[in-house]
Image (spheres, rainbow, N blue to C red):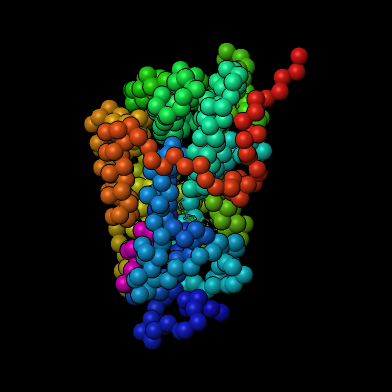
Amino acid sequence: MERFFLELDPPEEAMRSWPHVVVVGGGFAGLKVCHALARQPVRVTLIDKRNFNLFQPLLYQVASGLVSEADVASPLRQMVGHAPNVQVLLGEVVDIDPEARQVLLNGQHLGYDQLILATGSGSTYFGREEWRSLAPPMKILEHADEIRRRLLMALEEAEQTRDASQRAFLQTVVVVGAGPAGCELAGALIELMERAVRREFKQLRPSDCRVILVDLVDRVLPTMAPELSAAAAGHLEGAGVELRLGMKVEEICPGCVRLIGAVGVTELEAATICWTAGVRASRLGLLLSEHTGCAVDRSGRLVVEPDFSIPDHPEIRAVGDLCCYAHTADGKPLPGMAGPAVQAGGWVARDLLARLCGDTIAPFRWLDLGSMAVIGPWYAVADLRGLHLTGRVGWIVWALAHLAFIPDTENRIALFSKWMWQIATRQRTALLITGRPDQHIGVDVGLFRATRPQRSG
Ligand SMILES: Cc1cc2nc3c(=O)[nH]c(=O)nc-3n(C[C@H](O)[C@H](O)[C@H](O)COP(=O)(O)OP(=O)(O)OC[C@H]3O[C@@H](n4cnc5c(N)ncnc54)[C@H](O)[C@@H]3O)c2cc1C
């Protein structure tokens, strides 16, 4: 069995006897594990299907052309590859054999002594997978590119369209899901559309720009305090976002979203439809559950032990969005957020090192730093463990927290300067129409997509 690094040369003599820790996923949790294990007496192999770490909280800024892809992503080799005991491998882990202690990637088996799974989560359409191509989610860089591409293509087409109702259709966006990602996206898109249309398009009227935010729940940001929801809703509406809350998406077809709620059925016609409504754990969760009998929750997250291990497999741990960790003070599972993922990654690495020395460390305690959402330039809402902030103060706290979390110094500087530039000038520089969406979304979505639904009668 391959017990060392996947490499042509054997590891340095001194490293051969060190335990081999395989980390799958270089997101918030996996990267933290690797940083904590760098230059420690373990051999670490980090496997990721992408060669970069993605800062998902700022994806909406890529989708709305405020920043570009490289501002929110950092190559994993640059982040951890320089540590002598960390090897980075590009590949997707497609199977795990807990008995043989091996993972399968790129057609090869790789053995491990300790396995840390940090493969995060994806989006779900609650059984309506056919909606995916019509309403792209916002989980990976290509999704954000695709949302930006669809919106900009629609605006370009609108600029050349004589029919006023078709122009209005092309200038309409529906965002499904009024959690932080949906609110941030809606706020950024209305700002982008109104500004761009006012200054740079000659045939379009800003008053025809519509961004409609839809959710089944009757308030935006439902996990935050009601007064913060109200403040965010007020700001969004003031910026021009239309809220359709307490309404369920019943159907999505090309250019149309059908909602059903207490007031009956509503049909929204929109050239651009985005989906931020559902989260499902990475499929490695279900796979491991089938192999080990470990329970998963409704979102497919592995229900883990107090040390993040899988029952009967102390050598396998799951952290971040992939795990359901309910050993908290109030018994509520850790939220699927960056903070808990980073804290869990750091704790698991420390625990692993301590156990190798025959030591133990204090049990995992999650420090809840709160949550926040940015709704527009200079406006954010923040719930910091009971301290509620809104407006400009909220924005400053949001900006500082995000800059602190960004793992790369160059990106930190680039983001800060772009935010300041945008606030000063209201300009966005990353408004490029790029990409071949069929590579990522599975369908060809060219200009024809922006056709209004055909009505009979
Ligand atoms: C649009 C959006 C906005 C968000 N905003 C916020 C916010 O404002 N604040 C906040 O705290 N949280 C936010 N989150 C949530 C936060 O990003 C996640 O909770 C966090 O990324 C989880 O970290 P993770 O390490 O578990 O997974 P991820 O960061 O998702 O990393 C998973 C990694 O695993 C890799 N991978 C997956 N499967 C495999 C495989 N089979 N083989 C190899 N590699 C694999 C992926 O390529 C990825 O690099 C947001 C999420 C999204 C999508």
Dominant secondary structure of the residues highlighted in magenta in the image: helix
Residue 337: x and y, percent?
40, 44
Q: Is residue 426 left or right of residue 303?
A: left
Left or right of 439, for residue 25: left
114 lies above or below 404 = below
- Please tell me which residue is depicted at 50% across the width and 76% down the height of the picture: 6
* Residue drawn where x is 38% and y is 86% of the image: 13
Q: Residue at x 61, y 50 (%)?
A: 439
The answer to whether one can see residue 343 in this image is no
The magenta segment is: 31-40
Please state the horizontal and vertical placement of residue 346, each as a whole percent of the image: 34, 58
Q: Position of residue 350 (x, y in %)?
A: 32, 63
Residue farthest toward the right in the current orientation of the protein: 457
Q: Residue 276: within the magenta?
A: no
Nearer-the-camera pick, 207 or 385 = 207
Residue 43 figure quarter: bottom left
Residue positioned 35% across, 47% down in the render: 339
